[in-house]
Amino acid sequence: MKALMISNDSLLHAELAAQGSARLPAVQVVASRQDLRDATDRLLPEPPDLVILDASGVEPSEWPLVERLTRLYPEATVMLLARNAHQDLLIRAMRAGIREVLQLPLVHRAFHEAMDRIEIETGVTRMRDGKVLAFIACKGGSGATFLSTNFGFALAALAEKKVLLIDMHGQFGDATLYVSDQKPAMTLSDVCAQIGRVDAAFLESSLVQVTSNFGVLAGGDDPSRTVDMKPEHIDTILRVARQHYDFIVLDVGRQIDALSLRALDSADTIYPVLQLALPDIRDGRRLLDIFRSLGYPADRTRLIVNRYEKGGKLRLSDLEQALGAIVVHTVPNDYLSATDSVNQGIPVLQLSRTSPVARSLGELVELVTERRVVESKGLFDRLFGRSGSEQ
């Protein structure tokens, strides 16, 4: 979004430029004018999307210039900044067609909330109705974190969706390490501690941004701070996330507590992850019994078998019979590709895009997004079709 700034306050100009550049998509201050007369006399060759007007020094006699400015840039949204937003100013702003009036000194949260409204109204971004997908391990070591993080990356890369992954591990959360070498600036517990500030911009700024449309909210790294995390905090975070992301992937971990239960209650689909082994089947049956006792519909829970190898003594049909549930997807045992990915902190799709596990993730993306191969020629085939000779 391109903005014109009208102000003789260089510090305010720098502050707004910094706040605008931190947004996704960015607000770029492409031009500045000292005052209203300068702005109306020197028009931009290309009309701006946004006009930010510092009304601190605007006299009542100059308001016709404000109305003229709105006529000169009829497609632009005008944001008015004022140190004293008295009733007369608000009435004049309303008559000029200005909807956004912010108080100075600038409150950053108020600015970002106003920009959220402007972007939705102008169609720069749209209010989404994101789906929450929860990955939960039936047994420790099942590979649920590897799958959730790499699936989130694949969903963003292959289906071009805006994806947020939340590491729900109350302590020693390490989901970011699977897909990035960046150090998290904030964690889930940090966000919960500032829950009153949570909006789209604050949530975005808290993430490890792996790609432009895939970010990770890191798990807590201080066990003592988990006591301050409340189930209602999860409600707030997911409510904001649903409005601004196509998919929210939860790495729930294995522990069932008040936080994880609230997250599971909110999930549209739950993916228990297990291996084809008796200990996993035993723990998987216990987990599904808990889900049934909570009243979760059977079709909301969809099993994923990780590290699957055909020809073993246990068959998929044995697992399904023991658990009373259908396996919707299997991920092949691709030890070398998965290990290289984990050790380097690079998504397997990016590191080894023709590997069996990468192809399996592509198939899972198609399953979740309901994009049929005959219509799309295959999301993963489009990505992999040209790469066979590169490996």
Image (tube, rainbow, N blue to C red):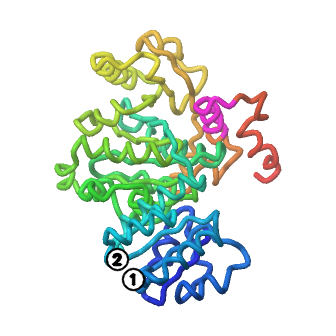
Decide which of 334, 49 is in the foreground and name it: 49
Residue identified by numbered label 2:
104
- Pick whichever, 335 or 248, lies toward us: 248
Residue 268 lies left or right of residue 139; in this view the side is right
Badge 1 local density, few (<14 within 10 Å), some, or many (20+)? some
Check the image and report above or below for 165 versus 94.
above
- Quarter of the image with the N terminus is bottom right
Residue at disc 2, secondary structure? loop
Magenta stretch holds residue 362: yes
Q: Is residue 116 magenta?
A: no
Q: CA distance from mark 2 to mark 1?
A: 9 Å
Q: Nearer the viewer, residue 53 or 347?
A: 53
Q: Quadrant of residue 325?
A: top left
Where are the magenta residues, as a range? Answer: 359-371
**Upstream in sequence: badge 2 or badge 1:** 1
The residue that label 1 is drawn on is: 56
- x%, y% of residue 311? 60, 20
Q: Which residue is depicted at the point 50% across and 71% down?
A: 20
Q: Which mark is residue 259?
A: none
Query: Does the magenta stretch mainly form a helix, a strand or a loop?
Result: helix
Q: Are marks 2 and 1 in contact (CB under 8 Å)?
A: yes
What residue do we see at 36% from left, 33% from top? 266
Residue 132: horizontal and vertical position, in percent? 45, 36
Nearest the eye: 151 or 199:
199
Q: Position of residue 66 (x, y in %)?
A: 53, 75
The kind of residue tagged 2 is: Leu
Q: Can you tell which of label 2 and label 1 is closer to the viewer?
A: 1
Tell me which amino acid carries mark 1: Ser
How busy is the neighbourhood of tag 2: few (under 14 within 10 Å), some, or many (20 plus)?
some
Would you say 355 lies left or right of 70 here?
A: right
